[in-house]
Image (cartoon, rainbow, N blue to C red):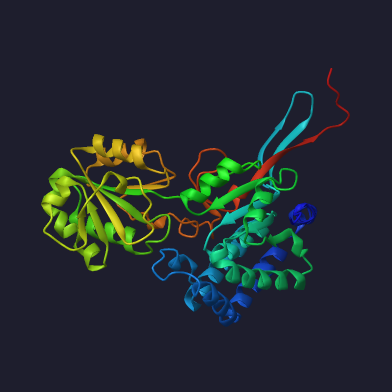
Amino acid sequence: MTDFTPIFQSAKISSRKLASLENNQVQKILFNLADFMVSQSDFLIQENQRDLERMDPSNPMVDRLLLTPSRIEGIAQEMRQVAELPSPLHISLEEKVLPNGLFLEKITVPLGVIGIIYEARPNVTFDVFSLALKSGNGLILKGGSDADFSNRAIMSLIHQVLEKFGIPTDAFLLLPADRAATKALLEAVDEVDVIIPRGSQGLINYVRQHAKVPVIETGAGIVHTYVDETADLEKAKTIIHNSKTRRPGVCNSLDCLVIQEKQLSNLSELIQPLLDSGVKIFADEKAFASLPKHDLVQLAETEHFGIEFLSLQLAIKTVKNIDEALEHIATYSSRHSEAIVSENQENLNRFLREVDAAAVYANASTAFTDGAQFGLGAEIGISTQKLHARGPMALRELTSYKWIIRGNGQIRT
């Protein structure tokens, strides 16, 4: 059995040097890598194709796994945006002078070594590297076997650029895609400072249950949009369609349409764009009764609520009022992203105030829950918990802080 301890220790030692890198040097590395990855698009797509050939084309993870020239350019552009952002390090958060003359300052510092466990998402390899380097953190990646060829190709480009700039490559590692590596990473309490899982609810649950290293949960999105009795029909139609179909395999896509019963007469019109896009509908009894027969419309079962579909499928829940809507969302939400479509200011304010989620929307698509869209450059994940960070985790969220105390011989009596 492989002993990963020496590898983890090396990453820990090398990561200490990252916090002292000048911001302009980090910028040069990221700009260089962004250009290099675009120039190597053919190589990346070739290796990505090897992964795609092993995956069932009907698997909803195919969309997340796929790399194309335009997606590679998009990833590179996000990397350039991260490069241009201010450094999150050494920022003074608080200063004060005590009565005894001690000067106290609280400043931002890297978390240390971050372990990322993720599934078939090769873009994550590039995204988290750019954020980790910019925030002075070491990185140990554990990707899934479905994307192993893609991840190894990406890491080879990263290491080539790091070597060019004289940065130790063992501060940024990709582990083998096997369970032994996962177990070792989850138990590396002396070398890894935090674990961040990115993927399905099953993956997140596994990491939370087995990790000895502190965990920040990101990810699973069981997303609702509530359309109340005052909603503008055209707004609702476009918001629902975009939330569900833009990229159905990502965590901010819509899973359940919650509709106020007075809108049932408009439901056929609301969901027609979804049906035109091939979305399969699971409607509760009231919604099902209000819809004409259609091959894509079925009567919902209990298990269709509280599920992250990650595909062209959607549940519909009918409610009498906003109280029932809030109760349904509170019961089934993963606290990722939730939305309301309404022209009633009281309902809007109540929804925004009472819904417990990392991102809560009024009259907008949940597809915007994304670090780049929030102006953060990129993200390491969407945190659905409340300790340390919540929502898109970007540069500032990858730092902690320490106290600096300057004195002149003071002692405590």
* Of the pair 25 and 298, the residue shown nearer to us: 298
Q: Is residue 232 left or right of residue 348?
A: left
Q: Quadrant of residue 133?
A: bottom right
Q: Position of residue 332 (x, y in %)?
A: 35, 41
Q: Position of residue 46 (x, y in %)?
A: 56, 80
* Of the pair 55 and 308, the residue shown nearer to us: 55
Vertical relation: 211 (above or below) 246: above
- Using the rendered image of the protein, determine whether residue 89 is visible from the camera's viewpoint: no
- Using the rendered image of the protein, determine whether residue 385 is visible from the camera's viewpoint: yes
**Where's the C terminus, which quadrant?**
top right
Residue at 63% from the left image edge and 61% from the top image edge: 129
Residue at 66% from the left image edge and 73% from the top image edge: 32
Vertical relation: 412 (above or below) 97: above
Q: Position of residue 324 (x, y in %)?
A: 24, 36
Q: Quadrant of residue 349?
A: top left
Q: Is residue 101 left or right of residue 72?
A: right
- Please identify the residue farthest to the front as the structure is shown: 1
Q: Give the total number of marks visible in the rendering.
A: 0
Vertical relation: 263 (above or below) 53: above
Q: Is residue 7 left or right of residue 60?
A: right
* Of the pair 112 and 45, the residue shown nearer to us: 45
Q: Position of residue 110 (x, y in %)?
A: 69, 49
- Please identify the residue farthest to the top as the structure is shown: 413
Q: Quadrant of residue 291?
A: bottom left
Residue at 30% from the left image edge and 58% from the top image edge: 313
Q: Is residue 99 left or right of residue 33?
A: right
Residue at 71% from the left image edge and 39% from the top image edge: 402
**Where's the N terminus, which quadrant?**
bottom right
